Image (cartoon, helix red, strand yellow):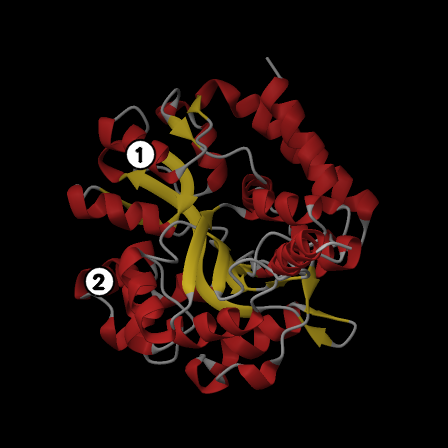
Amino acid sequence: MTKRQAVAASSLAMTLAVLAVPASADTLRLLTWGGYAPENVVAMFEAETGHKVEVTLSNNEEMIAKLRATAGGGFDLAQPSQDRIAGPQEEFGIYKPIDLSKVDASLFIPSMLEATKANTTVNGEVYGLPHVWGTDGLVLDRAQAGMVQDYTDLCAPEVAGKVSYRLKRPTLIGFAFAMGIDPFALYGDEAAYSEMLATVEAKLVECKPNVKTYWGGGDELMGLVRSGEVVAAMAWDTGGWKLNADNPDITFVAPASGALGWVDTFALPAKGRADDAAYAWINFVMRPEVAAMITEAAGNFTASQGADAFAPDELKARYQESFPQEAIDNINWYPPVPAGLEALEGAVLDRVKAAN
């Protein structure tokens, strides 16, 4: 081998070695929801820890699809809802267990931490920690849709043509509860669950003439409500509270059959390569004063112990109006989704969309 060949070989070996090392191992690739990683929080984290943060906004369905496509690669921390962890993990193996010794448990509301750990445990390993929580329910212009008290009231003639909801599983669940069926109680019986879905499908097809549009994103829905094109919708509480800031007639209302309670979590993708940065982010954003900044950006409260003391007074007031104690006690919290159930639901939603 000549000296030039030796130098070339050495250079190639160095290049291959560099490529073999994960690029930007100190960069946290975060797969999350809008508002959960506001720019001011990211800047504080980067300045304090030296880690960089790359934020990809998503939703439950897209998160699972992205992680399935890469067998849990491409991201270092994801934030699926707690009911989207156990089932996908059992079916696809897209997450890795959480090392609880690297998490400051004192930062979390104890009851919410324990409940989420229980709901995200697979084969004795914990796969999720609680972060942001909230509810699905009704967003109403009370001056025009005051008669709407439950999900099925969105099908009433008084609001014909001025209704919106998503073609997603919360709509199936909410309508089932409003029709006197507890869908969560049927999770273990696929035949009974399929029968329930058929009943809800028929109702949603019947309700189609009332629907102005099926909304896809929060900004789209808020634009429709602000313009008056939509006066009643099934949506998140934070959307109603943001609209209430502009128009006191519009707010979030807990349905008579119960709001649907969700918890968005911290979960580690199976092939994440920056676990240290992920744990640093979790412990950072759960500090009460930082968690309050996320509440201000996202509009929902977090599982951070004591963070409510730092929350804006206006948000506290809206929360208390929407959720008197009886409404809180009536929340239907999402349990883990059994493997295979979402495929059944997806087929129903496709048929509702295609129906004339």
Q: Nearer the viewer, residue 329 or 190?
A: 190
Q: Is residue 294 visible?
A: no
Distance in Å between CA atoms under marks 1 and 2: 22 Å
Seen as rendered, the residue at the extreme top is 356
Q: Quadrant of the C terminus?
A: top right
Q: Residue 346 location, x and y as percent? A: 67, 35
Q: Which residue is mark 2?
A: 317
Q: Which image quadrant is residue 287 in?
A: bottom left
Q: Is residue 70 above or below residue 287?
A: above
Q: Considering only order in the chain, which callout, 2 or 1, is on the residue closer to the N terminus?
A: 1
Q: Position of residue 333 (x, y in %)?
A: 55, 61
100 vs 325: above or below: below
Instruction: In this rendered view, identify the residue nearer to me: 208 or 310.
Output: 310
Residue under the image location 39 percent in, 57 percent down: 36
Image point (52%, 46%), residue name: 59
- Find out whether the residues at labels 1 and 2 contact each other: C-beta distance under 8 Å: no
Corner quadrant of residue 291: bottom left
| Secondary structure beneath label 1 | helix
Q: How many marks?
A: 2
Nearer to us of marks 1 and 2 is 2
Q: Amino acid at mark 1?
A: Ala
Q: Residue at x 60, y 52 (%)?
A: 74
Give amino acid for label 2.
Answer: Ala
Q: Position of residue 188 (x, y in %)?
A: 79, 56
Above or below for 301 versus 136: below
- Locate residue 320 relative to residue 84 in the image: left or right: left
Quarter holding residue 273: bottom right
Q: Is residue 294 left or right of residue 60?
A: left
> Which circle marks residue 145 in the picture?
1
